[in-house]
Image: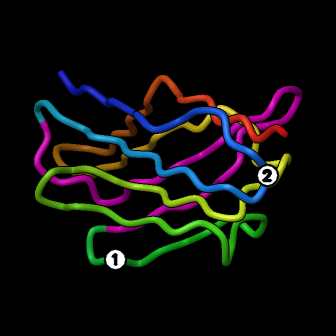
Amino acid sequence: QVQVVESGGGLVQPGGSLRLSCAVSGSIFVLNTMGWYRQAPGKERELVATITTPGYRKYGDSVKGRFTISRDNAKNTVYLQMNSLKFDDTAVYYCYGFTVEGGRYEYWGQGTQVTVSS
């Protein structure tokens, strides 16, 4: 059984910052890729950022230069530092994990709401 627990969402004013955390625990040793996706009302789920075990990072175009992803491999935990938040960043943010350990598996969190509003 694998658990994906997200935290850190909330309400913030434009220009503000938030930090999301996600811990993946259970019957798993290595997550090759961890990251975040988001989905705004009426829109498709989109990539925010991913990071591999060695530290290769990929960002969605709309967050480059504002968001920073990091991870703690020993804890299977991933973080997303979000700065200079905009109204368009309002969405449900989903934690994502991928492993090839024993097969190819994806894990998703239940989502955490981020609302940017004045």
- Rendering coords of residue 26 (x, y %): 13, 30
Q: Marks 2 and 1: in contact by CB < 8 Å?
A: no
Looking at this view, is 94 or 9 the one in front?
9
Find disc 1 in the rendering and name its residue: 55
* Left or right of 103 on screen, residue 83: right
Question: Does 38 appear in magenta?
Answer: yes
Q: For the magenta stretch, what is the residue range?
A: 28-52
Using a 10 Å C-alpha cutoff, classify the residue at mark 1 as few (fewer than 14 neighbours), some (14 to 19) or many (20 or more).
some
Q: Give the amino acid at mark 2.
A: Pro
Question: Does 46 appear in magenta?
Answer: yes
Vertical comparison of 112 with 15: above or below: above
**What is the C-alpha distance between the residues marked 1 and 2?**
29 Å
Q: Give the amino acid at mark 1.
A: Gly
At horizontal 37% and vertical 66% (from top left) the residue drawn is: 70
Find disc 2 in the rendering and name its residue: 14
At horizontal 59% and vertical 66% (from top left) the residue drawn is: 67
Mark closer to the chain start, 1 or 2: 2
Q: How is the image coloured?
A: rainbow
Of discs 1 and 2, which sits in the foreground?
2
* Left or right of 111 on screen, residue 55: left
- Rendering coords of residue 100 (x, y %): 26, 52
At horizontal 71% and vertical 48% (from top left) the residue drawn is: 46
